[in-house]
Image: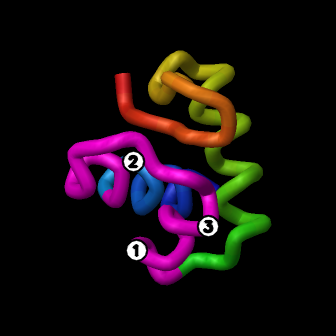
Amino acid sequence: MADVKAKVLEALRKAGKPLRPGEIAELAGLDKDEVSKAIKELKAEGKVHSPKRCFYAPK
């Protein structure tokens, strides 16, 4: 899972704007369900936040 989380964070940083889980999955070449799980963990760790509903950005 650490690898998936790293890819999610990298995709968010490269995008430079808040993204939806589906967009993150597409950019990172990951499954949308994996991305959703990773986002949940990253939010709990304080590494990502949700500036608006269903969009995520790195802190």
Q: Quadrant of residue 7?
A: bottom left
Q: What range is drawn magenta here?
A: 11-29
Residue contact at pointers 2 and 1, CB within 8 angstroms:
no
Q: Is residue 45 magenta?
A: no
Bin the neighbour count of mark 3 within 10 Å (Cα to Cα): few under 14, some 14-19, many 20 and up.
Answer: some
| Numbered disc in front, either 2 or 3 | 3
Lower position in the chain sequence, tag 2 or tag 1? 2
Residue 37 in the figure: left or right of residue 38: right
Q: Quadrant of residue 41?
A: top right
Using the image, determine if residue 1 lies above or below residue 18: below
Kindly identify which numbered label has been placed on residue 9.
2
Dot 2 amino acid type:
Leu
Depth check, front residue: 38 or 49: 49
**Distance (Cα) linking label 2 and label 1:** 11 Å
Main SS of the magenta segment?
helix
Q: Where residue 50 sits in the image (x, y, percent)? A: 56, 26
Q: Which residue is mark 1?
A: 27
Q: Residue at x 22, y 45 (%)?
A: 16
Bin the neighbour count of mark 1 within 10 Å (Cα to Cα): few under 14, some 14-19, many 20 and up.
Answer: some
- Image color mode: rainbow
Dot 3 amino acid type:
Gly
**Secondary element at tag 2:** helix
Using the image, determine if residue 23 lies above or below residue 49: below
Bin the neighbour count of mark 2 within 10 Å (Cα to Cα): few under 14, some 14-19, many 20 and up.
Answer: many
Kindly identify which numbered label has been placed on residue 22.
3
Q: Where residue 18 sits in the image (x, y, percent)? A: 40, 41
Quadrant for the C terminus, please.
Answer: top left
